[in-house]
Image (cartoon, rainbow, N blue to C red):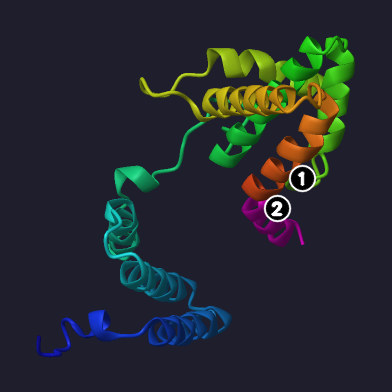
Amino acid sequence: MERTPENSQAFLTRREIREKFYREMAIAAECFRQGDGRASLQLAFQAVYLFARAAAPEADFDPLAKLGEGLHALDHGEVIEELKPTKSAKGGRPPQRFEERIAIGTAIAAVEIFRREGKAVGEAQKLVATALNKHWPGSKRISSLTVKSWANSVRTETTNGNMPPAKKSYNRAIAEFEKWKNLCEASGIGSPTAAGFLTEYCEPHWSKVLSALRIATAAKES
């Protein structure tokens, strides 16, 4: 196969692909520092998109392609449906972000696991709120009353016929605890504790899921 500009990406080694990505991201970063935010975002997106295509050509890139289409549309004063801001009810709080809904589902699962262990619900909510505050983005602190209010929102959450993120996260956390419990009991080391699950599963989960929001919120508040 003859090497041409159109297919040259396929001939690059992993090292060349990585070095090309670093160069393009450096250009995007410099553009950002110079004050051209829109152009820097487009350059960064293009770098990430091409890097991902080269690293995993078999993957489905439709969502990324749609995001690229959305960035291009903004240059022409248009906003594609997927990038339109979510509207909150008049006078109400802004909707929670997707990552927050995932973290909330895990928090309610932790309360449920404490409850099964015999802990009073109010005390369980305090323990979960204290642990979650180590990872929650921004200066807002989560109280036990906030955790209590989340329980009902997780039960009633709906999303266009699909399983909502908080409920899905709740189900996954409960399933992981049951799996862990079965493995421990089969190994003869007894049942795991809710406190252990909070430390070993929930906190690392919150740290990972909320990391990007913590960085963005800290930059916004500074």
Sequence-earlier tag: 1 or 2: 1
Dividing the picture into quadrants, the one containing residue 153 is top right
Numbered disc 1: secondary structure: loop
Q: Nearer the viewer, residue 179 or 86?
A: 179
Q: Are marks 1 and 2 in contact (CB under 8 Å)?
A: yes
Q: Residue at x 82, y 21 (%)?
A: 125
Q: Residue at x 62, y 26 (%)?
A: 179
Q: Kindly identify which numbered label has been placed on residue 36.
A: none
**Vertical comparison of 198 with 211: above or below:** above
- Would residue 118 be found to the left or right of residue 213 on screen? right
Inspect the image, locate mark 2, and give the three-letter code of the amino acid beneath it.
Answer: Arg
Where's the C terminus, which quadrant? bottom right
Q: Kindly identify which numbered label has been placed on residue 135.
A: 1
- Would residue 121 be found to the left or right of residue 10 on screen? right
Q: Determine the main secondary structure of the stretch shown in magenta.
A: helix
Q: Residue at x 45, y 42 (%)?
A: 85
Residue 37 spot, x, y in % from top left: 49, 72
Can the viewer see residue 134 in this picture? Answer: yes
Inspect the image, locate mark 1, and give the three-letter code of the amino acid beneath it.
Answer: His
Residue 62 spot, x, y in % from top left: 27, 53
- Would residue 3 be found to the left or right of residue 192 on screen? left
Q: Residue at x 77, y 39 (%)?
A: 200
User: What segment is highlighted magenta in the picture?
Assistant: 211-222
**Mark 2 highlights which residue?**
214
Magenta segment includes 113: no
Q: Nearer the viewer, residue 135 or 12?
A: 12
Q: Nearer the viewer, residue 113 or 24?
A: 113
**Vertical comparison of 99 with 70: above or below:** above
Which-is-in-front pick, marks 1 and 2?
A: 1
Crowding at label 2, few (<14), some or many (≥20) Cα neighbours within 10 Å? some
